[in-house]
Amino acid sequence: MSKWCPLRNLRPCRAQRQTATIDRVIRAFFADALLDPATGETVKEAVVLVEDGRVKAAGRRASISVPADCERIDASGLTLLPGLIDCHVHLTSLGEGLDFALWLTTPPTFELLGAVRAARRTLDAGFTAVRDAAGSPAGVRMAIDAGYFPGPRMLVTITALSQTGGHTDVHFMCGADLDIPLPDRPHGTVDGVEPMGRRVRELIRAGADWIKLCTSGGVLSPGDQPHHAALTLDEIKAAVAEAGAQGRKVMAHAQANAGIKNALRGGVATIEHGIWLDGDAIEMMLDGGNALVPTLVAPQWVIRHSDAGKMPAFAADKARAVVADHSASIRQAIEAGVKIAFGTDTGVGPHGSNGEEFLLMQALGMAPIDCIRSATTVAAATIGMPGVGHLKEGSWADLIGVPGDPLADLNLIATPDNVHLVAKGGEIVKSRP
Ligand SMILES: [Zn+2]
């Protein structure tokens, strides 16, 4: 694609962005095909016309008039589709295992700057938007938006809230507490209705777009169990009410059956992991229109890290114990028609590996188009980013190009190597010759 693709496109810079506000930047991406996840239709000989970062028109070349003086991007050999969306990542987690000694010797700034590398790898894998499910303060989102470093569009939860001894309580049995106070990252442990409401307010004050609760134990925490519920129904309702009063929704790390049901009764919007769904929980989700974010790949990475000697035994044992139930639970949800929003828990696994989740979803019975919808149209609606997940007039020109038909082979979006072109807001952030 080098013919029409000047090198300067590869390095979106401040100057370019400022120019865009003065002169209109019109760019046309010419590709072999264009897949619209909403309809499932692919048109051949396609063009996506972009003006000032947004889609002006997208479809068959013959049906779109391309201004003669616009910048032409040759994406021949590629199928274009909207940039992918991951509804559950942790950009400040390395994704290389769990090492408490390393944790103790890592300054907060080093942990934070890990998000710069993670953001780049996430983009390179074709993911142009993410919801960060704890770890990233709002400054990460702000720095990406300001163009300090390349990264996906972000929504942040900042801190995941759990009860004392719960999934995000990092007070260990020796007495050490690693919940170090940072001015832009409120504490994760909270008990009681009133403290919960206040903590949600603090998170919103710190810039949280979503609120995350842990309504069950988890795999990577030493002191709790995935099959135990956590937080009371009243605490969950208090968080949902406070979040809702300020226009935010709540996501729930919910693995235990009782924890899933408490979360749904309490009014959360999305169920993360969902290891032990049952018929009643599925019915509640169908009735409430809640989305399930499976993160099937997360326990796989815990096991892989463990095999490489990079995971404490307690976490590996818990991951091995849940993997089969997790798959069975998600399969049941898929069969019942629960809304599935793509999410990986990347940060448990390495950044850029997000796409593997597509293959696991497909193996549990999801059709390729539904896998792609889960990471485009469904994900955008689920996390509340209306300008992404589709390429229609007015949406952000966040798009990727892959060498072939992803509906015929999901591997084309499962590994970064297969994602040859990534554009965010019409600017090329990855281009493979
Ligand atoms: Zn997570």
Image (spheres, grey):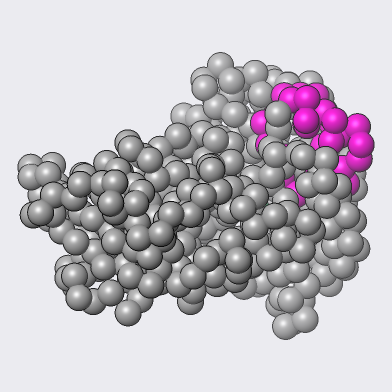
Is residue 197 shown left or right of residue 122? right
Say whether residue 317 is visible: yes
The residue at the point 78 percent across, 32 percent down is: 285
Q: Is residue 225 left or right of residue 305?
A: right
Identify whether 356 is placed above or below 234: below
Quadrant for residue 269, please give it: top right
Residue 125 location (% of width, % of height): 48, 66
Q: Nearer the viewer, residue 357 or 35?
A: 35
Above or below, 343 relative to 98: above
Give the vertical position of 341 relative to 4 (above or below). Answer: above
User: In the image, what residue occupies the spot 19% across and 70% down?
Assistant: 4
Residue sitting at x 52%, y 58%:
92
Residue reaching furthest to the bottom: 308
For residue 268, which quarter of the picture? top right
Residue 282 percent coordinates (x, y): 84, 36
In the drawing, does residue 18 fall left or right of residue 354? Answer: left
Quarter holding the C terminus is bottom left
Q: Identify which residue, 33 or 155, lies in the foreground.
A: 33
Q: Which residues are magenta?
A: 260-288
Is 187 located above or below residue 7 in the figure?
above
Q: Is residue 278 magenta?
A: yes
Figure disc tally: 0
> Can you give x and y, in whole percent of width and height, for residue 373 in the image?
58, 48
Confirm whether the magenta stretch covers residue 183.
no
Residue 143 visible somewhere in the drawing: no
Residue 144 x/y as whole percent: 34, 51
- Screen quadrant of the N terminus: bottom left
In depth, the one of 59 and 345 nearer the eye is: 59
Residue in the picture at 28% in, 59% down: 29
